[in-house]
Image: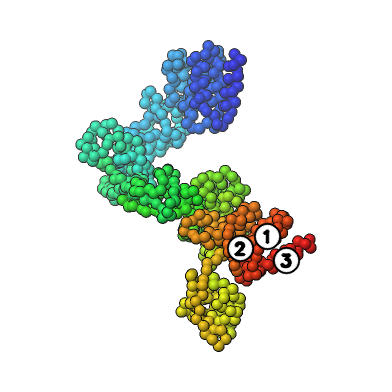
């Protein structure tokens, strides 16, 4: 007994929950009703179900269990000796559904007779006379049920009756029905529209009428159809099990209507319905032809391996040849040891699409969060932005608005969302916008961050400004060149002669004051002209030195370029991804790889990750020459020591450095290494 009481308490607790498992609960009550020595122990269970349904805690699908619970309560109250409550249950059942039929297998004749007597005192009847079959009768907006007599029982009172059938007129009448009265409803409905019945092979085909989606073919063909149309099915070469059930297109006016049948992996079937009279039309099954294309996925990077995924399904290792896919849009992802390749391609029927997979960092565009839910004002702006993002060659760009609901979490660095993004796209640059209103203007704050370091950068965009997309793209795409070509000279334009003149030279062939006239046969007028013509391994230069004009063959070398930390318009997140993803690129030479490492370290400095920056700088080996070189690396390692506060290590670093007189820190305009070290030593001694 104690165990049963505990069970009741648990069940009542479950019944008070909105997440009630009403099916299991009902079966537990039934088990007690049929198998327990004390059936009345099931009363609290069924009462709980009834109460939960009437309070709206259960879905409409629970209605059959609700009605059965009322039936069981009627019997259990009688078993308990509570005849009034039993009778009340019968009256309640009649009021809820006057056409309800009691379960004859569990209700004794005595109760069934009582039910009939109670019903006679509460209901009247509606008798519908309609020349059409398969009509629908709605009483007070709900589908009516007939009882054993073929009439519709309703509670006494005023009722609205509606007789309706697809493609026919609708008749609506109102009656005040008395107890025991039978009201006859004449419903001479007439046809006002036509219909067309089709079947498709295969099923699950989307149906469009005059460009509007009207539904999807489903199920399997009825047995009577298969028996009556054996020859047709054989003629079409259709497998009966792959033939859909009837799909009826209703409400067709006279004239011609275009129907399109669409399903992924199949060619679209298009035909015209010619409706000449208002009747039901039947068509032969429509057989859709398969529509597939092929993917060839490989990489031009020698010796690079990668796992290939198409639409989230792994299809093998690189290369993948002539992979059959459905025609349409497909997402391709290749996971390399050094990064990801992600691309969306459109494949036409019988087309072979070649994809060259090169590892790149990813951009994930999550969308724009509007001021009010569902109110999107920037669809054209957003479409243009996504197109421009996909034009950035150094990134794989994907738009995935599934993350838009997580924008608030992303702003706070939600680790679960970020890990999900990394799982799908690798270490990525995430971009999303949040709409705001400033006076009468609608603006968007765009946030950009890297999934590994979550250093948010923000830019505000006015979507009504035609140049705003370009500024945002430039912000993301402002990754500088990593190397420059130099002849170890510094020139400046002489405004009097309108020619570049040498102001500093580490090249033995050029001297300070030399005027540059021609480079590689092209006359030059500015610094930009001069530096733009420099190409390795050498250039021919004509210079004027005093009264002499000299023809020189200058050696040109490639040296790293360093991004500036005070360049606010530069998106360091995107720069970081670019530098990191290309360090192992076999197409880059030693100078370029060292330059990538240099700039990667500068990004770490920007992010405040000084230990990481120091480790990267320590792996760089540059010559001790003018411009970006060993002196630059020395200076940046010193910055790391300063930021961490390791002054003694900084002093040791400088003491161990064997510098030459011409070595510089940043570029040919900057400090010499000797000047930096002398200044730093003096400063440390004084402090």
Q: Relative to 447, does residue 68 appear above or below in the rendering? A: above
Mark 3 burial class by Cα count in 10 Å: few <14, some 14-19, many 20+? few
In terms of depth relative to the viewer, which is nearer, 335 or 620? 620
Residue at point 38% right, 35% down? Answer: 136
Sequence-wise first label, 2 or 3:
2
Q: Give the SS element for disc 1.
A: loop
Residue 459 x/y as whole percent = 59, 59
In the rendered structure, are the residues bearing label 3 and label 1 in contact, judged by CB atoms less than 8 Å apart? no
Residue 509 x/y as whole percent = 55, 77
Sequence-wise first label, 3 or 1:
1
Residue lying at the far top in this picture: please name it: 37
Displayed quadrant of residue 608 = bottom right
**Residue that carries the numbered disc 1 in the rendered image:** 656
Mark 3 vs mark 1, foreground winner is 1
Mark 2 vs mark 1, foreground winner is 1
Circle number at residue 630: 2
Sequence-wise first label, 2 or 1:
2
């Amino acid at each position: 007994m104690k165990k049963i009481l505990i069970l009741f308490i648990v069940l009542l607790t479950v019944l008070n929950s909105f997440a009630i498992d009403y099916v299991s609960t009902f079966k537990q009550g039934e088990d007690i009703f049929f198998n327990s020595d004390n059936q009345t122990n099931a009363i609290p269970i069924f009462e709980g179900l009834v109460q939960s349904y009437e309070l709206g805690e259960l879905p409409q699908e629970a209605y059959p269990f609700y009605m059965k619970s009322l039936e069981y309560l009627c019997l259990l109250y009688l078993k308990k000796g509570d005849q009034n409550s039993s009778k009340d249950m019968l009256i309640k059942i009649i009021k809820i559904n006057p056409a309800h039929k009691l379960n004859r297998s569990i209700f004794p004749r005595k109760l069934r007779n009582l039910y009939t007597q109670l019903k006679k005192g509460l209901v009247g009847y509606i008798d519908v006379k309609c020349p059409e079959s398969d009509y629908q009768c709605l009483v007070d907006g709900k589908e009516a049920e007939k009882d054993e007599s073929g009439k519709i029982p309703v509670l006494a009172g005023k009722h609205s009756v509606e007789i309706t059938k697809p493609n026919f007129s609708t008749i609506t009448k109102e009656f005040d029905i008395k107890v025991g009265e039978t009201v006859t409803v004449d419903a001479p409905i007439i046809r006002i529209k036509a219909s067309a019945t089709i079947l498709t092979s295969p099923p699950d085909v989307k149906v469009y009428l005059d460009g509007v989606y009207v539904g999807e073919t489903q199920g399997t063909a009825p047995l009577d159809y298969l028996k009556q149309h054996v020859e047709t099915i054989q003629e079409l070469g259709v497998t009966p099990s792959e033939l859909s059930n009837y799909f009826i297109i209703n409400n067709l006016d006279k004239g011609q209507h275009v129907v399109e049948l669409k399903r992924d992996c199949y060619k679209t079937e298009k035909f015209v319905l010619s409706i000449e009279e208002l009747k039901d039309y039947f068509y032969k099954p429509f057989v859709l032809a398969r529509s597939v294309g092929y993917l060839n996925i490989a990489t031009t990077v020698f010796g690079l391996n990668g796992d290939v995924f198409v639409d989230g399904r792994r299809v093998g290792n690189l290369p993948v040849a002539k992979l059959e896919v459905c025609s349409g849009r497909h997402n391709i992802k290749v996971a390399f040891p050094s990064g990801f390749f992600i691309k969306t391609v459109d494949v036409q029927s019988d087309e072979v699409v070649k994809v060259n997979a090169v590892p790149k960092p990813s951009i994930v565009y999550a969308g724009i969060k509007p001021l009010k839910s569902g109110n999107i004002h920037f669809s054209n702006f957003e479409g243009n932005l996504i197109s421009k993002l996909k034009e950035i060659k150094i990134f794989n760009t994907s738009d995935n608005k599934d993350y838009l609901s997580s924008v608030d979490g992303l702003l706070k660095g939600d680790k679960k969302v970020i890990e999900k993004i990394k799982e799908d796209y690798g270490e990525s640059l995430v971009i999303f916008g949040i709409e705001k209103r400033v006076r009468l203007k609608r603006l968007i704050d765009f946030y950009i961050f890297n999934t590994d370091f979550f250093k948010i950068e923000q830019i505000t965009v006015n979507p009504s400004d035609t140049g705003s997309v370009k500024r945002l793209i430039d912000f993301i795409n402002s990754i500088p060149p990593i190397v420059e070509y130099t002849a170890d000279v510094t020139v400046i334009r002489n405004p009097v002669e309108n020619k570049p003149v040498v102001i500093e030279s580490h090249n033995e062939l050029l001297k300070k004051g030399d005027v540059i006239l021609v480079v590689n046969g092209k006359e030059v007028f500015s610094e930009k002209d001069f530096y733009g013509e420099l190409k390795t391994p050498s250039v021919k230069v004509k210079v004027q030195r005093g009264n002499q004009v000299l023809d020189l063959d200058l050696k040109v070398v490639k040296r790293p370029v360093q991004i500036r930390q005070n360049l606010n318009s530069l998106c360091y997140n995107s720069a970081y991804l670019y530098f990191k993803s290309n360090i192992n690129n076999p197409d880059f030479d030693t100078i370029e790889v060292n330059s990538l490492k240099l700039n990667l370290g500068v990004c770490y400095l920007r992010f405040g990750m000084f230990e990481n920056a120091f480790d990267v700088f320590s792996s760089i080996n540059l010559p001790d020459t003018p411009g970006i070189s060993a002196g630059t690396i020395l200076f940046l390692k010193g910055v790391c020591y300063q930021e961490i506060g390791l002054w003694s290590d900084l002093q040791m670093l400088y003491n161990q450095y064997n510098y030459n007189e011409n070595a510089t820190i940043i570029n040919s305009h900057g400090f010499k290494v000797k000047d930096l070290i002398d200044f730093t030593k003096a400063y440390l001694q004084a402090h």
